[in-house]
Image (cartoon, coloured by chain):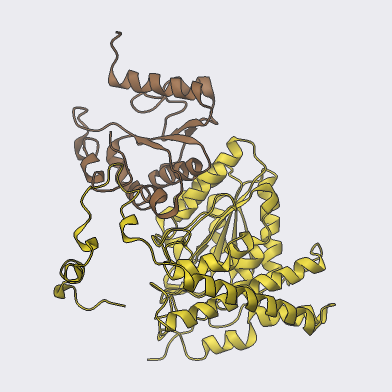
Chain colours: A yellow, B brown
Amino acid sequence: MARSGTAASRPAKLAHAGQSGDLSRAQKLELYYYMRLTRSLEERLVNLYRQTKVIGGLFRSLGQEADAVGSAYALDRSKGDVLSPLIRNLGSMLVQGAKPNEIIKQYMAKGDSPTRGRELNIHYGDLVRGFIGQISHLGDMVPVMAGVTLSFRMRKQDRVGLVYVGDGATSTGAFHEGINFAAVQKCPLVVIVENNGYAYSTPLSKQTAAKQLVDKAIGYGIAGERADGNDVIASYEVTKRAVDRARAGGGVTLIELVTYRRKGHAEHDNQSYVPAGEIDRWAGENDPIDRYVKRLLSEDFDRSDLASVDARVKKEIDQATDEAEASPMPDPTDTLVGIYADPPTVAPLWFREGIKSAVEVHERPASWGTHDV
Amino acid sequence: MSEATYLEAIREALFEEMERDENVFCLGEDIGAYGGAFKVTEGLMAKYGEQRVIDTPISEAAIIGAAAGAAHMGMRPVCEMQFIDFISTGYDMLTNYVATARYRAMLPCPMVVRGPSGGYVRGGPFHSQNPEAAFLHTPGLKIV
């Protein structure tokens, strides 16, 4: 059966290329640094995954680095702006101050990772640096960020919040309830819908009958804008307008950033559902880093400027990898700490030292099938 | 010692806490101008204004989720479920997000979700439930 084309089958042709008038030379190079760091860090994680050193899944943002980096760059960290990323917003977290060694430790579930091995991947937060860790239930961060930004408004703080959802999350009840609540309360919140064409294997055409996701803004009575998510400057500028609007008391903006997910939902996903040629087209014609490099070289940057950034990125990732690999795994007895006010005094059976068989009996009974990594 | 109904005692506590701590605020459906379906929050809006006594859309997930976000930032939200039966539509936010916040992400989440439970209002099967036992199976929540 011939596959029908999806909304994502062709790279986006959006009218306005970013102008970047207000960005300095150093800032433009910084945008390149964060995009390169995102891609190279994920490539390193793939290496570790293939060595079975990653615990759990590996979620790539290949081809989406520009929208994550450009949008987060529009926040003002000196004012205490806060963002809540999605699984494909590693770039946003790096902009906000997350460190490569933290990311690798999270993916390896190390005992000195930010969540002490309790959570994986980029599911972690830091209120000081201004990012709040997501949970897996899509859409839930919209109500949470409505509350975060409600507190800004109540305390008359000059702060803005930014929350990311994907095209799939716009179908959830939490997305609807959260954005509607924030709209009514005029919270200083920017909601970015990262439209990458797929939610796991489900194409946009099976997610919504709306012609474009930005149209949903009309129903909430809020501002809506749509931009080319593979243009880092355009992503920055559209978000900056929304951030300025929010800070000035103009309430919520919904931004649809059009991009494309070139890898599967996670590293295990073979993307059998993607029409032939679609991924190659985006990789060839619309890679966000290639496009930005071309742009920088057409301005007053030369190859050596970019090469020095590349070298810095490699050095930082090498150092982070060494540190993460040398880190200890979590202390098993830490697992129950913080669950109950009065933890059980007897260690759970599977933690008892020396009884390996207990693990086999209680953790992996034959009836569960084979699920070992 | 003076006698008070449960309802009056909760209202008195809300007045005391909102007076004592400006981070305390209430949110829920019809709790402001109307004073709540059971009048627990009656008089609160008149005294503390609509900034701190928030009439929300009919959105239990947003009420609980927004309370969590505000609590992360240092506020002390008190959510009202108009009837506790309706907490089921906020179940995901409460069990997956709120209850796990401190354990999985070291995020403080000091907030209250309260509501009237039980029968005797002749409300039928959706205004008479006692769902609290279901939440006892969720570490991270304190059931009172």
Choose top left, top right, bottom left or bottom right for residue A320: bottom right
Furthest toward the front, the residue is: A354
Q: Image point 19% across, 30% down: which residue?
A: B122
Q: Image point 45% across, 35% down: which residue?
A: B77
Furthest toward the top, the residue is: B1
Q: Work out whether B64 lies above or below B9.
A: below
Q: Image point 54% across, 80% down: which residue?
A: A43
Quadrant for the C terminus of chain A in the image: bottom left
Who is closer to the viewer here, A133 or A237? A133
User: In x, y percent, where is residue A181?
Assistant: 50, 45
Left or right: A86, with B5 as reference point: right
Q: Work out whether A370 lies above or below B30.
A: below
Left or right: A133, with B40 as reference point: right
Q: Image point 70% across, 68% down: which residue?
A: A234
Residue A42 visible to an observer of this rendering: yes
Residue A229 visible to an observer of this rendering: no
Task: Count the labels in the image.
Answer: 0
Who is closer to the viewer here, B108 or B130? B108
User: In x, y percent, where is residue A154?
Assistant: 58, 35
User: In x, y percent, where is residue A171?
Assistant: 43, 61
User: In x, y percent, where is residue A235?
Assistant: 66, 66
Left or right: A222, with A248 as reference point: left
Who is closer to the viewer here, B38 or B96? B96
Who is closer to the viewer here, B72 or B39? B72
Quadrant for the N terminus of chain A in the image: bottom left
Q: Work out whether A234 lies above or below A260.
A: above
